[in-house]
Amino acid sequence: MNSRTAASQMNYLKAVQKVTERQGYARSVDVAHELNYKGSSVSVAVKRLCELGYLEKGYANLIFLTDRGREQIQAVK
């Protein structure tokens, strides 16, 4: 993974964390709004982050950080 990809993924993870802390849950549309990105871009990124084990999608397309995702954010702080 190159540093640009890692930085982009971290932006998504941090946005999911921020939205979740603010409203108690996160959806792709909320993350798109937070980052001012198109929903389609966020959907692709969320799918990839789920495949990598950083995020999980749940009921009603809610997005959750996994333990691995939280660890990744903590490692960068």
Image (cartoon, rainbow, N blue to C red):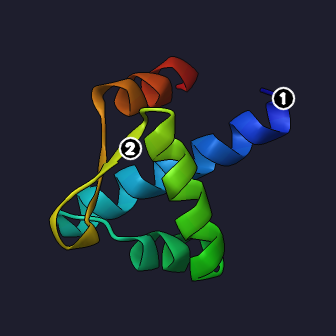
Which one is in front, 57 or 38?
57
Q: What's the residue at 57%, 67% (across, down)? A: 42
In which quarter of the view is residue 6 placed?
Answer: top right
Residue shown at the point (84%, 29%) measured from the top left: 2
Is residue 65 visible to us here?
yes
Q: Secondary structure beneath disc 1?
A: loop
User: Is any part of residue 36 visible from this angle?
Assistant: no
For residue 55, above or below residue 77: below
With 14 as the anchor, is 76 left or right in this view?
right
Question: Is 20 positioned to the left or the right of 16 in the image?
Answer: left
What mark, if any, has residue 73 been given in the picture?
Answer: none
Residue at label 1?
2
Q: Give the amino acid type for the residue marked by disc 1 in the picture.
A: Asn
Residue 30 drawn above or below residue 22? below
Residue 76: image location, x then y, percent: 57, 24
x, y percent for residue 57: 30, 55
Q: Which residue is mark 2?
A: 55
Residue farthest toward the front in the current orientation of the protein: 51
Q: Earlier in the sequence, mark 2 or mark 1?
A: 1
* Image point (40%, 22%), residue name: 71
Q: Quadrant of the N terminus?
A: top right
